[in-house]
């Protein structure tokens, strides 16, 4: 029996199936599903790319700042403001380096009140007279601009009277 197994092993190999070339049909995707290649940026290199250095912007001089200053206020000379009125000021300060300083000085006592408003944007205030000022009376007001290079330029000012009572005009009460 051993001999039969050995003879069978030495015999011819069984016939292998011959491969046939049948094409593989794959379904195609609709165009909206098909990915389109997009370019990718190269990875950063160790060598930095040269960039232009920022140029220094010069601060405009005081004459240029004054020429572009826009100011609107209700503080005309001789104006009588009731104790329940408002002090109103709107300003367009052209330089971010400038600060608008508003100062009120009582004519008899010399008592001072003021405010600093930042430059660069439209700025304003509307404050009740009774809150802004310490007491009724005549007030001198000044408005100046200041920068780190120059102080108190572009002087504007005047005077007004703050009455010590509420307005007696009926139309003013209706407006408020």
Image (cartoon, grey):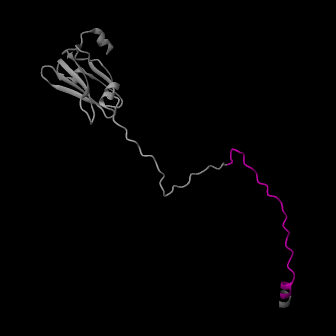
**Which residues are the magenta region?**
6-34
Q: Is residue 11 magenta?
A: yes
Q: Is residue 20 magenta?
A: yes
What is the residue that sits farthest to the left in this orientation? 109
| Image position of 142 with respect to 147: above or below | above
Q: Total of numbered circles in the picture?
A: 0
Observer-nearest of 157 and 6: 157
Residue 69 on image: x %, y %: 33, 25
Which residue is found at the position 83% from the left and 84% from the top? 9
Q: Is residue 105 left or right of residue 126?
A: left
Observer-nearest of 13 and 128: 128
Q: Is residue 160 left or right of residue 61?
A: left
Residue 88 position by quadrant: top left
| Image position of 37 with respect to 126: above or below | below
Which SS type dominates the magenta stretch?
A: loop
| Image position of 126 with respect to 36: above or below | above
Where does the C terminus fall, quadrant-wise?
top left
Q: Is residue 10 left or right of residue 61?
A: right
Can residue 128 be seen at all in this image of the molecule? yes
Residue 174 position by quadrant: top left
Residue 57 on image: x %, y %: 37, 38
Residue 157 on image: x %, y %: 24, 21
Residue 30 on image: x %, y %: 72, 46
Which residue is found at the position 12% from the left and 22% from the top? 109
Where does the N terminus fall, quadrant-wise?
bottom right
Observer-nearest of 116 and 16: 116
Can residue 131 be seen at all in this image of the molecule? no
Which residue is found at the position 37% from the left and 41% from the top? 56
């Amino acid at each position: 029996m051993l001999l039969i197994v050995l003879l069978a092993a030495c015999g011819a190999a069984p016939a292998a199936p011959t491969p046939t070339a049948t094409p593989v049909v794959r379904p195609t995707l609709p165009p909206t599903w098909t990915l389109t290649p997009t370019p990718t940026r190269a990875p950063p290199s160790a060598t930095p790319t040269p960039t232009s250095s920022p140029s220094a912007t010069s601060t405009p001089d005081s004459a240029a700042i004054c020429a572009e200053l826009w100011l609107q206020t209700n503080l005309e000379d001789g104006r009588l403001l009731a104790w329940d009125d408002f002090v109103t000021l709107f300003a367009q300060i052209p330089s971010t380096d400038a600060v608008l300083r508003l100062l009120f000085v009582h004519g008899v006592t010399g008592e001072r009140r003021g405010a600093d408003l930042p430059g660069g944007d439209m700025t304003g205030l509307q404050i009740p007279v009774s809150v802004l000022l310490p007491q009724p009376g005549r007030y001198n007001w000044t408005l100046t601009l200041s920068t780190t290079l120059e102080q108190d330029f572009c002087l504007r000012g005047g005077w007004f009277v703050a009455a010590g009572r509420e307005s007696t005009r009926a139309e003013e009460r209706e407006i408020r």
